[in-house]
Amino acid sequence: MQDQELVALCRQGDVEKYALLVERYQRLVFGLALHLLRSKEEAEDVAQEAFLRVYKQISKQQDDLDFLPYIKRVTSNLCMDRLRRRRTENKYLEHNQEIEVPDYHTPEQEAVKHAERATLRQALQELPEMYREVLVMHYAGGMTYEKIAAALHQPMSIVKNRIYRGKKLLKDIYVKMEGGGPDEMRGYQTSVG
Amino acid sequence: MKCEDIKRQLDDYLNGALATPNAMLVEHHLENCLSCMDLLLPSDPELESLLAADWYAADPSPDFASKVMSKLKPRLSWQRVFFLVVGWSGYMAVWMTVALYWLFPGLFSTIFTRFGWVLRLGRAGYVTISTLVQTASRFSLSTAGVVILFAFTALIFLTINKIEKEGLA
């Protein structure tokens, strides 16, 4: 059943259908929160809160909503609130720990893709927080530059600059992890995708 | 270096064909010029597509979905609203009867003798109505009446508020 049908049924009061949406997207929502917050407990809290908020919104809103982009935005915003609070409380360093993100268990033909993704996750972990944060928000969270700028209380020039530098740095780290030098980078550019 | 120069040299820069001093000038300009940075941001489709995939997915605790579902409040249905109102009214009627009996001990014997036929028809609901009639006849502005009126108003207000919050199935 499509997301929109499930959302429509939830709006009519069929609570059980929401469980299907939760099961379908729990890994993405939790993963997004985990990569932003780097704390499993907090990520799970935020993911739960996001699902509850979206359910309330579905009940109130009569217009169709695109479930996945919407819940990603809600999750990113909740994470930003937590990060802001954490920074004001100077707890940032305590939480900035390595996170273990379990890899997929998938058929062999998918192995290459998943290896790339695993390397990307590792490369992101190596990135400084300021760059990783904007990249995760933009690519995983689907947030626009404007929304990221508003969430971080930073001008858009800084956000774009961080995304630009972050991607550059990410690519360097990625290539190093793949065991290549500058020559292999070209190889990577043509092989991925 | 001007924006036009950057646009002209961008392809060479991305392909690594620019000499180092020139590449550094391009980089310096790009980092400080928003419009030129826009040209550069979507310039890496391979990395973009990798980043746009669901690389970030991770497994939450096994009971994650059930935790979420247990926190979802069932939305109100008309039946629930009906039972809510009737239930609260009954509950209040019982307590009001007890309160009135305590305040006016002689009241019920009066009702029983004068309006016994009413009591034969029903229980608590009729007792309350009879009590209200009696109380209203004794006091022009019955305290009990005001309390009941206030309680019913509050009940209706709370129910509407709950419906607005949770919606109606």
Image (cartoon, rainbow, N blue to C red):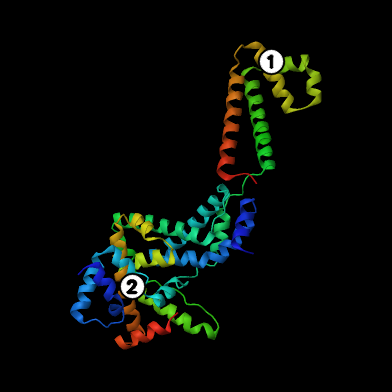
Residue A140 is left or right of residue A54, and the answer is: left
Kindly identify the amino acid type of the residue bearing the numbered disc 2: Lys
Q: Nearer the viewer, residue A71 or B16?
A: B16
The x and y percentages for residue B141 are 59, 14
The chain letter for the residue carrying disc 2 is: A
| Residue for badge 1 | B134
Residue at the spot 61% in from the left edge and 28% down from the top edge: B152
Residue B106 appears anywhere in the view: no
Residue at the spot 35% in from the left edge and 80% down from the top edge: A174
Few, some or many residues within 10 Å of mark 1 (<14, 14–19, 20+)? some
The x and y percentages for residue A75 are 45, 59
At numbered mark 1, what does the secondary structure look like: helix, strand or loop? helix
| Residue for badge 2 | A167
Kindly identify the amino acid type of the residue bearing the numbered disc 1: Gln
Q: Quarter of the image containing the N terminus of chain A?
A: bottom right
Residue at the spot 41% in from the left edge and 77% down from the top edge: B46
How far apart, in angstroms, are the residues tagged by discs 2 and 1? Answer: 82 Å
Residue B163 appears anywhere in the view: yes
Numbered-mark total: 2
Name, please, the residue furthest toward the left.
B21
The chain letter for the residue carrying disc 1 is: B
Q: Quarter of the image containing the C terminus of chain A?
A: bottom left
The x and y percentages for residue A65 are 54, 55
